[in-house]
Every structure is written in C-alpha cells, then in structure tokens.
Image: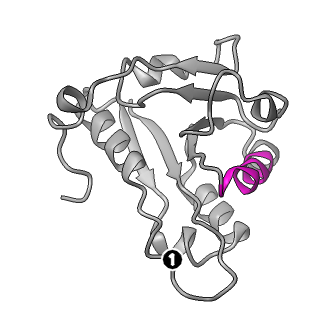
Amino acid sequence: MAVKIALVQLPLQSHDYVYSLENVPLAAGYLASHLSCAGNRAEVAICPPEVVNLGGDAAIMRWLEDVHPVIVGFSCYLWNVERTLYLCSLIRQRMPGSTVVLGGPEVTGDNEFLLGQDSFHVGVVGEGVGGDVLDALHPAKTSPIATAAHVPINRGFTSLPHPQA
C-alpha cells in the first residue's frame, strides 16, 4: 500500500495582496517525481497554489486534513521557517497520526533554533532524491535530523520526469 505524503512550501510573506508567482515548489515537485518512480510506494500531493499562496493557515490545515497524509513535508527557507513551525505544531495537535518532516536549506545538523523545537519529527539534510527517503523517515529513528545521500544534479535530477510536465 502506498504511503500518503503531503508536501507544502509556504510563500514569502508580503505586505500587499498580489498573488505570489514566485512560490514555485520545485524541490517538492522533484521529490514527488522521485517517489513516484521509486516503485509507487508513495502517493504524493503538493499543496495547490491557490491554497498555499492565497489561503491562510486555516486553509492549509483544512487541505491537509482533507488529504489525510501519513507524512507531511515542509520546505524550509529563511522566510518561512517560523510559520512552518507554527503549522507543524498545529499538525501535531490536530493530526497526531502524521509524521512531520522538514527539509530545505534551513535544515542542518547545527541549526540550534530548529533542534530546540518540538513541533516536527524529522529534519532531512541534503537532497531529498538521494538514498531512500521513505526509509530515512521511519518513525523509529532516534535523531530528529536524518541525512539523505547527496545525488549530483547530473545524475539525480536529469533522469527524473520534470515535475511540471
């Protein structure tokens, strides 16, 4: 049976009401493409642009609750890490059966800010298309930070179907 995974990349917060065209979840798309090619062990849903870019936290939570994922993954960047952690705490309260996973450039083994948080289960360092991501996210892991094997771009991404195709 396929593992249900929801991926979310929060946009840069702006002080205007212009639709955020800059928020393109490319890393989530490549991860979804990789997982779909990995023996169909995962059913991946990426939060739709109209929800993640235009909706507030309640809209994102409603989407997640409708999807019922076993794993919720967030792409963490400097501009969204605090809001991401807030949503993670909501997920842990309202969806206790889901594993919350963080990835992205803010997730490192020496990020004291993240290591001091209890709102997520696992942080993945490195390229999500490296190694077996589903095994790295096994709930029995003892460390909050898992390291995915780095896959060079010329070998890892070019063999995957483009996520926007």
The answer to whether residue 116 is left or right of residue 55 is right
Q: Name which residue lies at 27% across and 25% down.
A: 152
Q: Amino acid at mark 1?
A: Ser
Q: Residues within 10 Å of mark 1 (few under 14, many from 20)?
A: some
How many numbered markers are drawn? 1
- Residue 81 in percent (x, y) is at 69, 50
Q: Vertical placement of 8 versus 36: above or below?
A: below
In this orientation, which residue lies closer to the viewer: 154 or 72? Answer: 154
Q: Assess whether residue 82 is covered by the magenta stretch.
A: yes
Find residue 107 and report its image quarter: top right
In this orientation, which residue lies closer to the viewer: 26 or 93? Answer: 26
- Residue 139 in percent (x, y) is at 63, 19
The magenta segment is: 79-90
Q: Vertical placement of 47 versus 125: above or below?
A: below
Which part of the image, by quadrant, shows the C terminus? bottom left
The answer to whether residue 35 is left or right of residue 65 is left
Q: Vertical placement of 90 versus 38: above or below?
A: below
- Residue 146 in percent (x, y) is at 58, 19
Q: Is residue 138 visible?
A: no
Which part of the image, by quadrant, shows the N terminus? top left
The answer to whether residue 132 is left or right of residue 101 is left
Q: Name which residue lies at 55% across and 39% down.
A: 105
In this orientation, which residue lies closer to the viewer: 71 or 75? Answer: 75
Residue picked out by circle 1: 20
Q: Name which residue lies at 82% across and 46% down.
A: 93
Q: Secondary structure at mark 1?
A: loop
Q: Name which residue lies at 79% across and 52% down.
A: 86
- Residue 35 in percent (x, y) is at 33, 34
| Colour scheme shown | one colour
Q: Is residue 77 visible?
A: yes
